[in-house]
Image (cartoon, grey):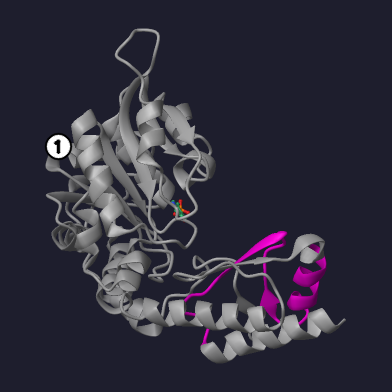
Amino acid sequence: MPVIDLRSDTVTQPTPAMRQAMQAAPLGDDVYGEDPSVNQLQEYLAAELGFASALFVPTGTMSNLLGLMAHCERGDEYIVGQQAHTYKYEGGGAAVLGSIQPQPIDGEADGSLDLAKVAAAIKQDDFHFARTRLLALENTMQGKVLPLSYLQAARAFTRERGLGLHLDGARLYNAAVKLAVPAREITQHFDSVSVCLSKGLGAPIGSVLCGSAELIDKARRLRKMVGGGMRQAGGLAAAGLYALKHQVERLAEDHANAERLAAGLTELGYSVEPVQTNMVYVQIGDQAQALKAFAAARGIVLSAAPRLRMVTHLDVSSAEIDQVVAAFAEFRQN
Ligand SMILES: *Cc1c(COP(=O)(O)O)cnc(C)c1O
């Protein structure tokens, strides 16, 4: 039975054409800076997003960590959303490894951080306090796209307050495709951006940190320190480059499938949150475990959560979305 896995967009398999690109990639030792495929990926993405430099790393967690550590010294602080990935889902790495104090604040319904709340969280220059250095945003934030006008305001605000601005852009391209703008329209507002190649873009592994030459030089040193200096990594970089060249536009299909799923479940009477990109959140309540087991018996892999997240991606077709809706309908009748 073919499996429909909606837990995350990280579960995709490399396509045959991507595997071919990986196979054909010229290789070298990237710790010496000599892997042509890694260099090509880094140069491509830096140019596309409007940065001087870029660094290929194994994971988004490492990319964010290096970004935060490149901005902040020991005893500095970054302001971040309570639900942000860097704060909540990365093992506290910035604090553990970077001695960077997070200052979390509640996020807004649209995924943004209220700049008045950010302003109130900035510490005065006083030796009692950590030094507030950086604001970190996330886009998309649980599937929500931050408005361009907000990004512009966040840029102006951080400039005025002397803060750096980092973007966890794990799903940057979902945001760009949704807004129908070049990704650069989003990234131009930031000092550093982390992009995941292994989410909706469909590469098996890898993230890229983009920033100034100085920031990326610092991040490269830190990458070595945390064990992220890879050698003949070009096969992986080639997968990422292939994804960036061939699998960005198709994210619109994932967004359409997410809307299709949301519409189907709404029709069945489920409470579904508005969908913007490739994530569907639906209230399942205390049925979460039962639903997971029911779906699994029908080849559908779900998480078990009262507020269930389902994520569309390149290995889920619209016909399979209809199968999922049918399974929910059957479950609801039982
Ligand atoms: C997945 C994800 C990351 C981290 O990526 P990994 O490659 O899993 O370490 C960072 N931020 C967001 C928003 C993510 O969804």
Give the residue drawn at x 31%, y 33%: 134
Mark 1 and ligand 1: say if the CB distance to the nearest ligand atom is below 8 Å.
Answer: no
Q: Quadrant of the C terminus?
A: bottom right
Which residue, given by chain and number where applicable, does mark 1 sit on?
214
Decide if residue 215 is on the left or right side of residue 200: left
Decide if residue 320 is on the left or right side of residue 178: right
- Quadrant assignment, res 303: bottom right
Decide if residue 123 is on the left or right side of residue 283: left
Figure label count = 1
Q: Secondary structure at mark 1?
A: helix
Magenta-highlighted residues: 289-317
Magenta-colored stretch includes residue 271: no
Residue nearer the viewer, 101 or 199:
101
- Quadrant assignment, res 25: bottom left
Position of residue 202 measured from the top left corner of the image (x, y, whole percent): 41, 71
Q: Is residue 191 visible?
A: no
Give the residue drawn at x 67%, y 70%: 271
Q: Is residue 69 visible?
A: yes
Decide if residue 87 is on the left or right side of residue 332: left
Give the residue drawn at x 50%, y 82%: 257
